[in-house]
Image (spheres, rainbow, N blue to C red):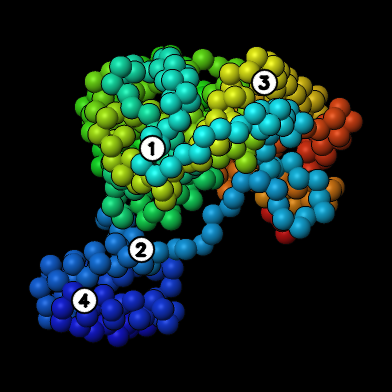
């Protein structure tokens, strides 16, 4: 179908294209005419069409794929973490911490009374800042130059960090497979995700090098307990990634150390002492609970200043009551002991379930973190459908991938809160679901 695109100015051409998109004549994912061809057809300068496409990209209506052309933006929703609403199935794909292992804040809440905070006062509670400075500096090469910022959780921090540094259609390097919230943040921001493969040691060197060659302006990565794979950076891999980044000191590197206090692995940073634009983000949600929407960001002074401009006191600061509650919990010996027990529990239960799977004939490995990333010999969606018939709701791996086709043969399971009987039953059901899915594929091929 020939498109009826009109206009002589960039604004007129952009309005015409937007009307075609709104009417459905151009659908999500479809490619706009090449710049030169449209310019010739309309009898206008090529730069006029370039400007029209740029207007649409800045509005989030289209996305540029370089040599792949300019396409209508796909606004399909990204899968979200958490419980599936309205399901009667046993949900083993939530990504949630165990509620029984989240410390009870009741005693600390009773002691929260104090002088109210007024407009114009410091955004960070001074006592929390003193504690956080020590928490963030260990293992961070440029610790002496760091500045601290408090945000409403890690996702809030990453969104604001990207927004202060990028414009629409800028390229961002993301791990592949990737944390669902990171995919959502990049898509909603109108940025272009460039996938970097993840292996057992974290983000790959060649993958990062290729992303930098494509002109990414930011890199978002997880140094340990990567979600969904459970991978953690080895010392050698971290050093190799730092070497790759040495030639790109102004690329914003964001480290999301979400599992921090619960992790069974040491922290290895890819941020070198002389890197110019960087941020380390640590949230408290995994060990104090998702409703404790607070994260600490350590960053270089310029990034911290820009981030502060997006956290104007009186509009979007983080409640000082929440800050004081966090401080009371993370400085309490009993709470710290409970956090340590929780970290050990997650590791032990995940390892035990992997052993159950191996006995049932489904080999897997337990990484760090809340979840398991299970390799399958058949497509994960077929296995998840079979599991639904057995009363389980699991997450197929293709929800987490950007370009890695291997994710279609993975399940992400959250099993640490299952008792032994339910864990035995799920392991047996996963094995049965794999066999059933494989049988259906064979019958399909024969037919």
Asked if the residue at tag 3 contacts the one at tag 1, i.e. Cβ–Cβ closer than 8 Å, the answer is no
Per the image, label 2 sits on a secondary structure element best described as: loop
Quadrant for the C terminus in the image: bottom right
- Mark 1 = which residue? 121
- How far apart marks 2 and 4 lie (CA) works out to 15 Å
Residue 413 image point, x, y percent:
69, 37
Judged by depth in the image, the label closer to the viewer, 2 or 1, is 1
- Mark 2 = which residue? 60
Residue drawn at x 62%, y 24% is 329
Q: Residues within 10 Å of mark 4 (few under 14, many from 20)?
A: some
Residue 97 image point, x, y percent:
68, 34
Q: Earlier in the sequence, mark 3 or mark 2?
A: 2
Residue 35 image point, x, y percent:
20, 68
Quadrant for the N terminus in the image: bottom left
Residue 27, above or below 121: below
Judged by depth in the image, the label closer to the viewer, 3 or 2, is 3
Judged by depth in the image, the label closer to the viewer, 1 or 3, is 1
Q: Answer whether residue 210 is visible to the viewer in this image.
A: no
- Mark 3 = which residue? 335
- How far apart marks 3 and 2 lie (CA) works out to 45 Å
Residue drawn at x 25%, y 34% is 302
Is residue 52 left or right of 386 when viewed as pictured? left
- Mark 4 = which residue? 11
Q: Earlier in the sequence, mark 2 or mark 4?
A: 4
């Amino acid at each position: 179908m020939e498109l009826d695109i009109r206009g002589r100015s960039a604004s007129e051409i952009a309005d015409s294209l937007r009307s075609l998109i709104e009417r459905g004549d151009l659908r999500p994912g479809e490619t706009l005419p090449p710049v030169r061809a449209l310019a010739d057809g309309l009898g206008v300068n090529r730069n006029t069409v370039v400007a029209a496409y740029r207007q649409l990209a800045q509005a989030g209506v289209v996305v540029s794929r370089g040599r792949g052309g300019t396409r209508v933006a796909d606004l399909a929703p990204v899968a979200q973490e958490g419980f599936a609403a309205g399901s009667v199935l046993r949900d083993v794909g939530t990504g949630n911490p165990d509620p029984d292992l989240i410390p009870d804040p009741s005693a600390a809440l009773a002691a929260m009374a104090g002088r109210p905070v007024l407009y114009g006062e410091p955004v960070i509670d001074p006592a929390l800042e003193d504690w956080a400075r020590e928490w963030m500096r260990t293992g961070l090469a440029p610790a002496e130059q760091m500045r601290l910022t408090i945000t409403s959780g890690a996702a809030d921090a990453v969104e604001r960090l990207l927004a202060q540094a990028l414009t629409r259609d800028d390229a961002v390097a993301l791990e592949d497979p990737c944390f669902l919230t990171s995919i959502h943040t990049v898509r909603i921001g109108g940025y272009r995700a460039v996938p970097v493969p993840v292996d057992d040691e974290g983000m790959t060197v060649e993958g990062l090098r290729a992303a930098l060659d494509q002109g990414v302006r930011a890199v978002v990565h997880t140094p340990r307990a990567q979600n969904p794979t459970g991978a953690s950076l080895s010392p050698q891999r971290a050093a190799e990634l730092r070497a790759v980044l040495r030639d790109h000191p102004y690329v914003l590197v964001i480290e999301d150390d979400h599992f921090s206090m619960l992790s069974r692995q040491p922290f290895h940073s890819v941020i070198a002492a002389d890197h110019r634009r960087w941020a380390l983000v640590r949230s408290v949600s995994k060990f104090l609970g998702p409703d404790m929407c607070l994260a600490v960001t350590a960053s270089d002074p310029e990034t911290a200043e820009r981030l502060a401009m997006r956290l104007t006191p009186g509009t979007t600061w983080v409640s000082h009551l929440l800050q004081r509650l966090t401080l009371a919990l993370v400085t309490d010996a009993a709470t710290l002991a409970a956090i340590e027990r929780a970290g050990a529990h997650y590791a032990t239960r995940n390892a035990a379930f992997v052993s159950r799977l191996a006995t049932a004939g489904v080999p897997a490995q337990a990484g760090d973190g809340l979840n398991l990333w299970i390799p399958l010999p058949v497509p994960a969606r077929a296995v998840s459908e079979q599991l639904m018939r057995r009363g389980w709701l699991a997450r197929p791996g293709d929800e987490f991938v950007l370009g890695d086709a291997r994710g279609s043969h993975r399940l992400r399971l959250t099993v640490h809160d299952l008792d032994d009987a339910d864990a035995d039953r799920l392991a047996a059901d996963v094995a049965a679901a794999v066999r059933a899915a494989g049988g259906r594929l064979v019958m399909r091929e024969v037919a």
